[in-house]
Amino acid sequence: MWFQNILDNNQKILALAPMADMTDSPFCQTVKHIGGCDIVFREMVSSEALVRDNDKTLYMTDFDTAERPIIQQIFGADPLTMAQAAVIVMERSHPDGIDINMGCPVHKITSNFNGCSLMRDADKAGEIVKEMKQAIGDTPLSVKIRLGWNDPDTFKTFIPVLEEAGAQLITVHGRTRAQGYSGVADWNRIAEAKHIATVPLLANGDVFTPELVSKALEVTGADGVMIGRGSLGNPWFFSLAKAGEGNESVSIEKRVQMILYHLDLHLAHYGEKGIVTFRKHLGWYMKSQSLGQNIPGIKQFRGQLVQASSRQEVVDILNTLH
């Protein structure tokens, strides 16, 4: 597997997590442009929508070569539909791998037995992995899970099922579905998962700052870390983590420059409506946690930016930060 080459060089994997409505092509390109990110996991797409030839969903699987290596995440509950969807993605976009979502805790997803609901039925989960692996052949297949649905020890019996069915990389988020994103991610249980797994395993959950990457790796013993919310508004996260630096090491000038770089990619990808859909990113960029600096009036700037209606308006507001 190509990702094994990273581990064989005595390195740990730093991966960008798949986040709905966030890890689209422009954001992933921005992260890779800055550097430090080894693998990009693109936001989940519906297997049902893919087999129905839904244009919007198909477009979501398109990416720029600068994002490679890239793994496309798919969610669904029917083994044959999931397998068919994986083939559709491979033939259209040619990603470097396919990932199965068995970790999403959101009711909209789990109510249809998608996402983390699959952790309540190991046999079905295994069947999905088996069918998808057979469908995509030599292309790597990974799975993202949680500790369990309600029981935080479900992973102990679940991981072997996934591996036997053909999973070649597993990511474990350190919470149950019942916890959602509340409480604290249990890194110690992820360490247990690492001892159980025979394939590479990534740790996920509560790695909110670059400085926490080394701590997460130390506690879990994982082969790498998947970064989610910590990267929002902070595409420098990966390069900072590898350099052993914190958020405060990136100047405001550099941040403004990269925000505009990201904005231009976003507008090129989405057209005129992109200025509206980019507002969520502007909000994240202006959060003090992402900036890593105490900027007076940051809340006011944030309020202005998320109402901006043109690129020039964004530029004018950002220029007042200098």
Image: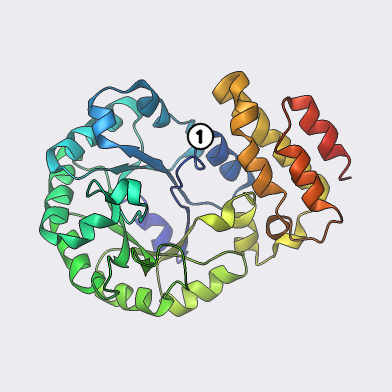
In the depicted view, which residue is nearer to us: 78 or 264? 78
In the depicted view, which residue is nearer to us: 2 or 105? 105
Q: Position of residue 34 (x, y in %)?
A: 64, 46
Residue at image coords 67%, 32%:
263
Q: Is residue 44 above or below residue 250?
A: above
Q: Residues within 10 Å of mark 1 (few under 14, many from 20)?
A: many
Instruction: Determine whether, in the image, residue 130 is placed left or right of residue 301.
Output: left
- Asked where in the image residue 187 lies, by quadrant, the reply is bottom left
Residue at image coords 62%, 34%:
278
> Does residue 89 appear in this view?
yes
Instruction: Determine whether, in the image, residue 95 is placed left or right of residue 268.
Output: left
Q: Secondary structure at mark 1?
A: helix
Under mark 1, the amino acid is: Ser
Color theme of the render: rainbow
Q: Position of residue 81 (x, y in %)?
A: 17, 36
Q: Is residue 321 above or below residue 275?
A: below
Q: Position of residue 210 (x, y in %)?
A: 61, 64
Q: How many marks?
A: 1
In the depicted view, which residue is nearer to us: 73 or 113? 113
> Does residue 101 appear in this view?
no
The residue to which callout 1 is attached is 25
Residue at image coords 30%, 31%:
89
Instruction: Determine whether, in the image, residue 31 is placed left or right of residue 155.
Output: right
Q: Is residue 178 above or below residue 251?
A: below
In the depicted view, which residue is nearer to us: 9 or 30? 30
Which quadrant of the figure contains the C terminus?
top right
- Asked where in the image residue 317 lies, by quadrant, the reply is top right
Q: Position of residue 26 (x, y in %)?
A: 56, 34
